[in-house]
Amino acid sequence: MIRFLVSIWQNFKEYIVLVILLIISLILLSQNNSQGIQKVRSIAFGTFASVTSVFTDIFNVSNLKNENENLRRTNAELMLQLSRLREYAIVNDELKGLLNLKDSSNFPLISATVVSKSLTKSQGTITLNAGKNQSVKVGMPVITDKGIVGIIYSISDNYSIARTLTNVDLKITVKNERSRENAIMKWNGDWLVMINVPKTYDIKKGDRIVTSEISSIIPFPLPVGVVYEIGNVEQGIFNEVKVQPFVDFQKVENVFILGLVKSKEIDQIEFNLLKSQ
Amino acid sequence: MIKPQYIISIILFFPLLLIQTTIVPLLAIDTVIPDLILILLVYYSITQGQIYGSVLGFVYGFLFDIITGSLIGSSMIAKTLAGFTAGYFSSENKQDQYLISYNFALIVLLSSLIDSTINAFFSSLNFTSNIFMLFFQHALLPAIYTASIALMGMIFYPKRKLF
């Protein structure tokens, strides 16, 4: 038996050694994440890396390395500074616009910042950092210097949530600034549309759309958008008019809440009007 | 009794790895780099035999994996098989013949091809890629580059033994 094994070893020792080594390698391959291997690796790698860094330093001009490091640091700092300045410029422009709006308005304005957004396809809402303590009430319009953003529909002590125009649950009365035609506008999931617009109405592409005075919520015209497309509904007597909003709801950050308390009496009338649509 | 050759072959690994990880990347041709450790392995496999070549490949692979942070076992398998293959050409009668520049380069090419193919399997295998392109880019090109370096090295190989 021993002689047999010895003869096998003599004839196939290269292959036997190879197979043993491969088996050990495969076992180690499966042990890559074990603590022991990781420990050995970290020691080996750390030791070799310290030697390598010395070796590398010899080949590199030492000043060049330091200079490169300093330049990279400066570059990173300048990039951060530039980024911050750009941000300031954007906020500055936005605030300037809001200040102009505040100066031109006689209505009480409560400034607020958007703290979170939920701009889903059909349920656009924004959370503002102004609530009951800042005299915010449900139903108050939210605006920017560009136009109307939405309506407050829920409040807490220091925060409030507003439905934006991109919310299917919000419908507002609007009018064509040029032809003074009124209509109800809502979000259909893709576009702001003025619904049930009689085909006889004088509406053209590019006309400015503003909020209507007949709304008890917003008693004076606020910019909404421009007519983008007039959909010719073949059957019936009504058209659908697509409106491109002035406000970019994705980018809105600083807003004002118009401190108006809607009249319950007028609201009731409007409610009846909406109900009849 | 351990032959001095064995110790020297292990000691030589470290400066060579240092060069491999610091200077050789500067010689990269579009990410393809030669493998100096493999050249040393082939040399020792031819001069010391197939078993020694396999064991040395195993040790080199282990050290390489553990130091460079590669997947432990991948280079071990690759270098063990490369050393085993190179060891085929170990013959006392023909040793000088195999160490002649172009013969040595061809053996390096064959061993390197095996080594690179196995390494490519562990590091770059992507079933959405063309397997032939993978073989060409990750196995054949490094093997040719390594063989070219070996060829240049063997031109200056001293006729008398250094060790």
Image (cartoon, rainbow, N blue to C red):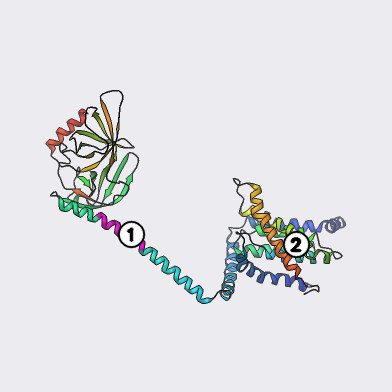
Magenta extent: A82-94
Q: Residues within 10 Å of mark 1 (few under 14, many from 20)?
A: few
Q: Residue at x 16, y 48 (%)?
A: A259
Q: Position of residue B71 (x, y in %)?
A: 61, 58
Location of residue B96 (image quadrant):
bottom right
Mark drawn on residue A86 = 1
Location of residue A53 (image quadrant):
bottom right
Q: Residue at x 17, y 34 (%)?
A: A270
Q: Position of residue A60 (x, y in %)?
A: 56, 74
Q: Nearer the viewer, residue B74 or B118?
A: B118
From this view, report whether residue A168 is shown above or below residue B17: above
Q: Residues within 10 Å of mark 2 (few under 14, many from 20)?
A: many
SS of the residue at dot 2? helix
Same subunit, labels 1 and 2: the answer reads no
Mark drawn on residue B105 = 2
Q: Main secondary structure of the magenta part?
A: helix
Q: Chain of mark 1?
A: A
| Residue B30 located left or right of residue A74 | right
Q: Is residue A134 visible?
A: no
Please identify the quadrant where the C terminus of chain A is shown. top left
Q: Nearer the viewer, residue B151 or A214?
A: B151
